[in-house]
Each structure stands twice: as C-alpha cells, then as structure tokens.
C-alpha cells in the first residue's frame, strides 16, 4: 500500500487508525516517522514519503514520533493472510528467530539461501532481516525501560542486544532520546509494578468482538494449563529460554496483557505469540466488508462485527489437542488433555495459583505407552504417529510452515480427515481461508440460514467468501448457543 501515494495521503489527512501498521509516514522536513493516525497536524503532501515498515524508516534515517509512537502500532495484516517467503520470514522474525539463530538460522528454517531471503525482504519491506530484528529489539527495549525498574544493562540483554553500547546507540538513533531520558519521561508510579510481572497493552484494529475469541479459549481450556479468572484468560507458555504465565483481559481499545516470565529474553516472543493467539493483527474491516457481500451472512456481521479467529500459542500443542477432540465433546477433549498434562506436563509455579503445568512437549509424549490412552485403538495410532513425527521433526507446524505443504503432510497421516486438517490449518497454522465444511455446527448453521447444508454445495457457495472463510466459520458458529460463543461471566 505504501506505493499508493494518493491513498496514503488521504489516510494520513483523515487520521484513519485502520491503516496503522499497513504503512508509515516519514516527514522529510522533520526527519520523523509516524503512524497514519498521528494526532499532530498533517504535513504537506510534498513533505511526506511512505515506507512499509518501521525498520525501513529507521534505516532511511528517520526517528520515531514521540506523540503517536509508531513502533507500537499493530502489525501488518499482510503477514497473517499470506504464506509466501516474505510472510513466513516476517512471522519468524517476530518470533525472535534472528536474535536466537541469526540470519543463517532464519534462512535454514525457510529453506532458502541467506542472500535470497535478504533480497526478497529488502525488495518488499525496504529493510533486511537484521534491520527488521533491530527495530523489534528497540521496541522491546523501550517497553522494558518504561514499564520496569530494571537496570539498563539487564534491559539491554533482555531485549536481545549483544552489548550495552549497541543498546544505547540504537535507542538514541530510533527515539532521539537516551535510555535514561526515555525512563525519565514516564511517571514514577508507572514503573513501580510487581517484581517479575510485566503489564503490556496489546493494540488492535477496531472493531474487535471478544465474545467468541475469549469464549472459545475459556470453554476449551485445559485444567492446569489454562483458566478463566477475574475476567482474564490465563495460561502457561513454553518459551525459547524458559516458561511464562500470561493473563489476557479484553478492554475497549486494547487487550491488557500481564506477563510473568522466568527469563526476560522471552518478552518479545511471548508478546508476539499472544497477539497471534488473539488474531490481533487482523484487518476486521476488510474481512467483514468481503463477507457482508453475501446477503445471508450480512445480518450476522451487522449484529456483531469484528470477530477474530481464536488461534494458539503453540501449533504442535494444538495439533495434539485436535486429535484428542476428534468425535468427542468439548468436555471429553478437555478431560483427555488434562490427563496428559498431569502425567507428562512440566510443573510450573503460579504465584496466583490455578495453573500447574506446561502442556507436554511432543518429545515427552512420544515415549508414552499407547495402552495408557483411554481412546479407541485407531485414534491411539493417529495420536502416536502425530507426536512421533512432531518430535523427530518430520512434521513441522511452526510459524514458518508452508500452509499447503503442511496440509499435505497432515492428510498423509493415519486418521487425519478434512475436519482435523482444516481446524489445524485455521487455528494452528493461521490460514485465514481454512474452511470446515464438514463440521456439524457449520452445517447446522448453514441450514438455519438458508445456505447449502451439504459439504460440497456449501464449499461452492463459500468460494465467494475467500480469502476469509475462517472468519465466516466464526460467524456461522456464533448462531449456536454453545459456550464457545460467549464471553464468560
């Protein structure tokens, strides 16, 4: 979008927050870059230039606006609706892979050469993987500076910087303030939180309907790993350097996120995975406008716009839970998962009580005795085959996954039919066009609305909803009175 000068200028002049994260406005006279909704008086059109990423702005010598804080805008929806090289690379960079494994590690995960990855990222985003990771480190550093009383040396390494000097230079270059000056701008009461607990605000593009999003997560919560408490969805997180516990609370203009981490280096990854879990980088206006063109869907959308797809913080965990949920009720699936957690999960300490374990890793489940599983023999085979392939790396379901290739590999597993593959594609892989044509709830909703009820006919009708069929699933599910569709009281 940043190449459409006229459209970008109109968005800046109208201060349209829907475009935050889609592009960034750099002002040639002040050398400052802003989000489109910046509240200051817009500059003259001839003084504006546009970039696709904050990293590109920084690389071109612009510094972040102190008023609109463009480094904290929602992520671009582009990386949620695509599965090409650039989109997969961006998801990996957001997940901290460059900081942990370097650019060669990023390229290896993607199956391309380092040069090819760098060339394609620069061509589309105006910045290479190192610059994109550097922009992310700067944002993490600012967050820690403003929300914790930690010493600057600890913040530097927690944010992913290799040295304190690099940390100081980057913060000054990006924000035009030193780390100590950034902290001095924050009211004292704002940095005095509970030790070891970080409070974040996760932005999103309005509208956001929290009912099905949090309702689904709460209704399917696995005891010991997840819970709904005091208006918040809480769960444990398995992270690269340790573990964490997160509490997510829906608010009118953001999602409040309270994180307890065993290692602060996991802050960026934890925040990214929470955003992915709640589908916060989606563009609900574009989705709803497309689905509203179907006259039978339009009343559902007008009644409760802004539904998101509840996703996951761990694709392997969700795939395992999808198998446990085959042909059983939600309550039975929770029971099966809770038994696995008790027997094979890693214990964690929850200061607030209630959460006791991390969900078992595939490596731990690969060694269990199949006879200990209280399920039919054919499903035991499905389960053991899945965890074995996840454990040895034969099947990969991470953020770098090619959606088409992952689907093919899942379909080749015994016991994996269209429903299981599509629900994993929708919620674990993040495919916005996954469609559960064989789901009983979808077929029942379709029949009530006057849509075709057979899978083949419904799939044909749903072609007009592409590429947002996963969102259509949420609206169709919402016609039922199942607890997944309601925000818990």
Image: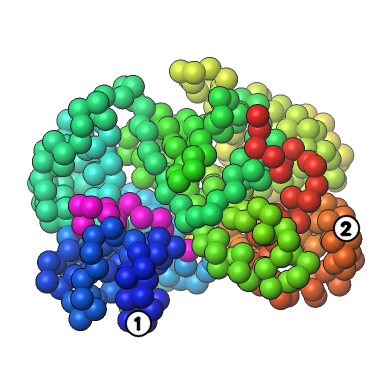
Q: Is residue 192 left or right of residue 318?
A: left
**Residue 359 in picture, x, y percent from top left:** 59, 33
Q: Disc 1 or 2, which lies upstream in sequence?
A: 1
Q: Which residues are magenta?
A: 64-77
**Does 347 sit above or below residue 371?**
above
- Neighbourhood count class around disc 1 (C-alpha, 10 Å): few under 14, some 14–19, many 20 upward: few
**Residue 267 in picture, x, y percent from top left:** 36, 40
Which disc number belongs to residue 6? 1
Q: Is residue 450 magenta?
A: no
- Disc 2 target residue: 448
**Does 73 sit above or below residue 360?**
below
Q: Is residue 272 left or right of residue 347?
A: left
**Residue 197 in picture, x, y percent from top left:** 36, 27
- The N terminus lies in quadrant: bottom left
Query: Could you tell me which residue is drawn at 24 percent across and 44 percent down?
Result: 142
Q: Are marks 1 and 2 in contact (CB under 8 Å)?
A: no
Query: Could you tell me which residue is drawn at 33 percent across and 52 percent down?
Result: 72
Q: Is residue 66 magenta?
A: yes
Q: Is residue 440 left or right of residue 76?
A: right
Disc 1, SS: helix
């Amino acid at each position: 979008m940043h190449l459409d000068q006229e459209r970008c200028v109109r968005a800046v002049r109208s201060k349209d927050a829907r475009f935050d994260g889609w592009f960034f406005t750099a002002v040639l006279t002040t050398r400052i870059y802003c989000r489109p909704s910046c509240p200051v008086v817009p500059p003259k059109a001839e003084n504006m230039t546009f970039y696709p990423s904050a990293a590109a702005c920084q690389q071109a010598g612009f510094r972040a606006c102190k008023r609109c804080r463009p480094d904290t805008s929602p992520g671009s929806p582009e990386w949620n609706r695509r599965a090409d090289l650039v989109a997969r690379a961006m998801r990996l960079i957001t997940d901290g892979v460059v900081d942990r494994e370097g650019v060669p590690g990023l390229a290896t995960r993607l199956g391309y050469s380092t040069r090819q990855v760098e060339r394609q990222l620069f061509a589309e985003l105006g910045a290479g993987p190192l610059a994109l990771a550097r922009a992310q480190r700067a944002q993490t550093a600012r967050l820690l500076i403003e929300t914790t009383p930690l010493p600057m040396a600890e913040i530097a390494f927690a944010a992913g910087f290799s040295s304190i000097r690099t940390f100081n230079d980057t913060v000054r270059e990006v924000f035009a303030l030193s780390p100590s000056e950034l902290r001095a701008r924050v009211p004292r009461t704002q940095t005095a939180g509970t030790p070891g607990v970080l409070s974040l605000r996760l932005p999103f593009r309005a509208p956001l309907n929290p009912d099905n999003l949090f309702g689904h997560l709460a209704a399917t919560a696995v005891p010991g790993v997840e819970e709904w408490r005091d208006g918040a969805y809480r769960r444990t997180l398995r992270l690269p350097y340790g573990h964490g516990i997160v509490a997510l609370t829906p608010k009118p203009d953001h999602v409040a996120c309270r994180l307890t981490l065993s290692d602060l280096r996991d802050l960026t990854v934890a925040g990214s995975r929470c955003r992915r879990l709640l589908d916060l980088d989606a563009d609900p206006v574009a989705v709803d406008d497309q689905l509203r063109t179907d006259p039978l869907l339009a009343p559902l959308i007008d009644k409760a716009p802004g539904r998101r797809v509840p996703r996951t913080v761990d694709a392997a965990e969700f795939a395992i839970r999808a198998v446990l949920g085959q042909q059983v009720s939600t309550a039975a699936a929770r029971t099966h998962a809770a038994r696995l957690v008790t027997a094979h999960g890693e214990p964690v300490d929850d200061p607030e009580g209630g959460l006791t374990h991390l969900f078992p890793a595939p490596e731990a489940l690969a060694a269990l005795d199949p006879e200990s599983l209280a399920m039919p023999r054919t499903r035991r085979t499905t389960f053991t085959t899945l965890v074995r392939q996840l454990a040895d790396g034969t099947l990969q379901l991470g953020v770098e996954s090619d959606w088409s290739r992952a689907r093919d590999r899942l379909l080749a597993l015994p016991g994996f039919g269209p429903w299981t593959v599509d629900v994993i594609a929708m919620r674990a892989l993040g495919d916005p066009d996954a469609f559960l044509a064989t789901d009983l709830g979808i077929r029942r909703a379709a029949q009530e609305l006057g849509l075709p009820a057979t899978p083949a006919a419904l799939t044909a009708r749903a072609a007009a909803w592409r590429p947002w069929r996963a969102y259509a699933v949420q609206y169709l599910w919402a016609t039922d009175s199942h607890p997944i569709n309601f925000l818990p009281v």
